[in-house]
Every structure is written in structure tokens, then in C-alpha cells.
Amino acid sequence: MARHARNERPEQPFTGFKLAHAVLSADGTRAAFTGLTLGAGRVYGVSAEASCVWNPRHAAPRRWCGCGFYCLHELSDARSLGCATENRSALLLEVTAAGRYIRYERGLRYSRQRVRVIRDSWCGCGRPGTALADAGSGLIGWRYLAPVCAPCAAGRQALRIADFAARLDGPVRLEPAPAAPGTAATGTAAGDAADTRTDAIAVLTAEIALLHARLDDLQSRLDR
Ligand SMILES: [Zn+2]
Ligand SMILES: [Zn+2]
């Protein structure tokens, strides 16, 4: 394998947090993950080595290219990213990052990944997910799955998250999220609660924009 002297190599693996979509093979026997945007067409298992989707001749991650796996250092940053509309059906994973890597202020882009824990997943109704149901979309050979809670899964075909994990190609721990603040109760102060949530969402959207801006800025500084 080609080695790039400019890229750093960690002495010890990093722990990071990321979002990924759950997928199930056409015959239902194998489970895996896919990336959100850049890696959306790539299916990966518990242990995976990154390769560049644009240029198979260079090793990922490479500066001037967006290839490689991504993770964030802080669980809270990954949770913020998970609030964005397009990421609502993603699973929050805890991973170990190793191999070649490029460091950012809030995360890493790297070559080797091991998924350790499946953490948060959220049903569209706001409750934590307990199972995964067909999301109605997919790739050739793989169906996308979306988290559902027990009440919403009633009457639908759904795979318990533990059964999904058992179909992965390696052992992964499950640490489900606690219920999100402000979503558990349906009290009389519904109007107030809705206002608070709107504010929280506005703040999170701003934070996510900032996070992306920082990553881009740091990338451009690293590349100079
Ligand atoms: Zn590349
Ligand atoms: Zn639900």
C-alpha cells in the first residue's frame, strides 16, 4: 500500500462519533452501514478500510480530496449533526479511527475504521428507536433502514436493533439514547414546549453551519 509521508499516523487509535445509515442485504441475512453524503453509495461493515471514490490510484484520505472516513471528537457534535432533517434516520455510531489520518479542529478524516457501539437512533415521532424498518429506499443489493420506536413499529415489519447488530460482520455494542429532552411528555404547555424546541433547532442549525464552516476553513488552512 502506498504511504504518504505528509499524512500523520496516530500512535494509538482515536475514539470518534459519526452518523451512518443502516442497510440490510436483499436477502435479509447481512447488515451494514453507508455514509451520509460523500460515501452514500459505499456499504461498509464493522471493520473497514477507506478507498477513494473518485481516484482509486491514491490512498484515502488525501489532502485536496474529500475521501476517507470522517468522525467527530465529541458526542454532542455528532448529536447536533443528527438533528438535521436529512440525517434524522441515521444511526449515531461510536468508532475507533486508525491508520492514516488528517486532523481537523472537531474531527478526523482517516483510513481505517472499526464500529464499536451503535448509540442513538430516533424514530420520526421523536422517541428513541428500538427497531429498524424499511426506509423505502436503497442501493442495488441493499435496503436502507430507518429507526422506529415500538408504538410506531406496531403492525410493520421491523428488525430489532439487536437483530440488526447480530447480522453485522463483527461484534458491536448497543447503547441506546435516553429520551430526548422535551419529547417525553405531552403536557398542557404544548405551546411553550414547541417554542422552546423551535429555538433549540435554530441554535443547532447555526451550530451545524458553524461546524461545517470550521471544517472547511481548517481544511483550506491545512491545504495551503
Ligand atoms: Zn481521494
Ligand atoms: Zn415512533
Image (cartoon, rainbow, N blue to C red):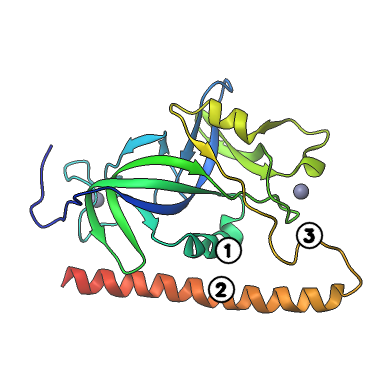
Could you tell me which residue is drawn at 41 percent across and 36 percent down? 44
Q: Position of residue 21 (x, y in %)?
A: 53, 44
- Sequence-wise, the earlier of marks 1 and 2 is 1
Could you tell me which residue is drawn at 64 percent across and 43 percent down? 146
In-image side of 124 versus 120 (left or right): right
Residue hosting label 2:
205
Of tags 1 and 3, which is closer to the observer? 3
Q: Position of residue 154 (x, y in %)?
A: 82, 36
Residue 128 in sight from this viewpoint: yes
Could you tell me which residue is drawn at 57 percent across and 58 percent down? 86
Q: Position of residue 62 (x, y in %)?
A: 20, 54
In-image side of 124 versus 104 (left or right): right
The correct choice, above or below, for 151 with respect to 159 in the image is: below
**Image quarter in which the N terminus is found:** top left
Could you tell me which residue is drawn at 78 percent across and 74 percent down? 194
* Secondary structure beneath label 2: helix
The correct choice, above or below, for 218 with respect to 61 in the image is: below
Residue hosting label 1:
84
**Mark-to-mark CA distance, 1 and 3:** 20 Å
* Secondary structure beneath label 3: loop
**Amino acid of disc 2:** Thr
For the residues bearing labels 3 and 2, Cβ distance under 8 angstroms: no
**Amino acid of disc 1:** Ala
Image quadrant assignment for residue 163: top right
